[in-house]
Image (tube, grey):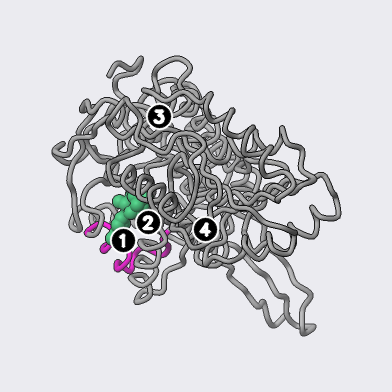
Amino acid sequence: MQLKTPILIKDQCLIGGAWTGTPVDDITNPATGAVVGRVPDLGAHETRVAIEAADRAFRAWSGLLAGERAKVLRRWYELQQQHAEDLARLMTAEQGKPLAEARAEIDYGSSFTEFYAEEARRVLGEIIPTPKHSGRVLVMKQPVGVVGAITPWNFPFAMITRKISPALAAGCTVVVKPAPETPLTALALAELACQAGFPPGVLNVITGNAEAIGGELTSNRLVRMITFTGSTEVGKLLMRQSADTVKKLSLELGGNAPFIVFDDAGLDAAVAGAIASKFRNSGQTCVSANRILVQSGIYDRFAERLTEAVSDLRVGDGTEQGVTQGPLINEAGLDKVELHVRDAVAKGAKVLTGGVRHELGRTFFTPTVLTDVTPDMRIANEETFGPVAALFRFRDEEEAVALANDTPFGLAAYFFTENISRAWRVAEALEYGMIGVNEGMISSALAPFGGVKESGQGREGSHHGIEEFLELKYVMMGGL
Ligand code: ADP
């Protein structure tokens, strides 16, 4: 792989300011199978060393003026922007998404670093009206301490900047464990962090055995908080493992997003929203529409228009001009998509387009539209994480809301209507952390991203995002 700045391709981990470890694990390009890099296979011992380095760095980093931390974050943001093209190419090589999407992710991801560079100066305490004349009630906000961050492969850049920019801005120090499929983007970010001037130990990135690294991060008393994005299953495990040391937790877990199209929806907007929400990153996002619920009166027209739009999507290697759909991340991902389609068809769903592996082979899957999907099918209850639009039919608003809420998950939901009363009613009734009304793309550094129910806890982005990394300390000033 050729980058303008080859030093961004790292093959070692960053621990306590030193590049460490022997590169042994191959990182492959899912579109071609080519080896694009190699990273170390580290474990509990090296994680402990990284945590201790983060702990040593904490006092000085949290003791800086907010404006001093802000300057380092700002430099890091500028370096991310300056190297955006290299970072996007690196990401497409290890993750598979089309280059245009990778570029958009660098923009989106770096906006968190920019935003929290600004937000660092706005961590404000309080003075609360006193309960006694001789005292005053003060509340200060202080950084939590050392943070362990565990991130997924679907957004190899943004899931890291979204977590650690607010943590670093607040004064925390961090140990990041990126996903094993996509560590190169994380290590490139670490290289840029060194160039930006983060002191040694403030940001550490470690690759290797997930259970061993996760086990140490969750059991070590020096780590005060775990921030995780990934599967609900692993999130629950980390929560259990963190119980003994009572860590703060921020968890962004799986979803089962409903996408509701009412009879009174704008058809063009609904189709465009469904394409954006369902087919971005080949359907591999936790906010991807998983169940497309369509009212009877508009069902056939919506299915037809969506099928036309889906047939126009182009599958291929993400570096090729015009490609909109890359491969799935791995065989397991492909098997799950295929299983969901097969199960749905066996139970009566119809395939309007796609439904099979793509002729390119590897882990490419043909963008698919299924109709007559019903709640007894696997696709209704599990996150498919692939390019399959599953269309359910409903009669009225009450049924749509009941269907939408009938899941243990509660991350993102979308609905399309041109009726303003319905827009308020349904937005209030949906049990989700995020709602797109006539909108299929909802993520932004300016808004709080996160879920309810088994989709997690805590919020990332916006002024709320930095609060996760702060503790309140109440001080009663007496004897006044
Ligand atoms: P996915 O199935 O999408 O890969 P995972 O939840 O398995 O989702 O992975 C998300 C992140 O969690 C990755 O960085 C992965 O390595 C990590 N992970 C998986 N299992 C564990 C574990 N037992 N402890 C800590 N981290 C883990």
39 or 326: nearer the eye?
326
Q: Quadrant of ligand 1?
A: bottom left
Q: Disc 3 residue type?
A: Gly
Count the marks: how many?
4
Which mark lies nearer to you, 4 or 3? 3
Query: Which residue in the structure is indicated by mark 3?
Result: 326
Do the residues bearing badges 1 and 2 touch, measured as CB atoms within 8 Å?
yes
The quadrant of the image that shows the N terminus is: top left
Identify the magenta region.
Answer: 212-226
Ranked by sequence position, the earlier of labels 1 and 3 is 1
- Residue at horizontal 29%, vertical 32%? 30
Q: Secondary structure at mark 4?
A: loop
Q: Which residue is mark 2?
A: 148
- Which of labels 3 and 2 is toward the front? 3
Q: Amino acid at mark 4?
A: Phe
Identify the residue under disc 1: 217
Q: Kindly identify which residue carries mark 4.
A: 469
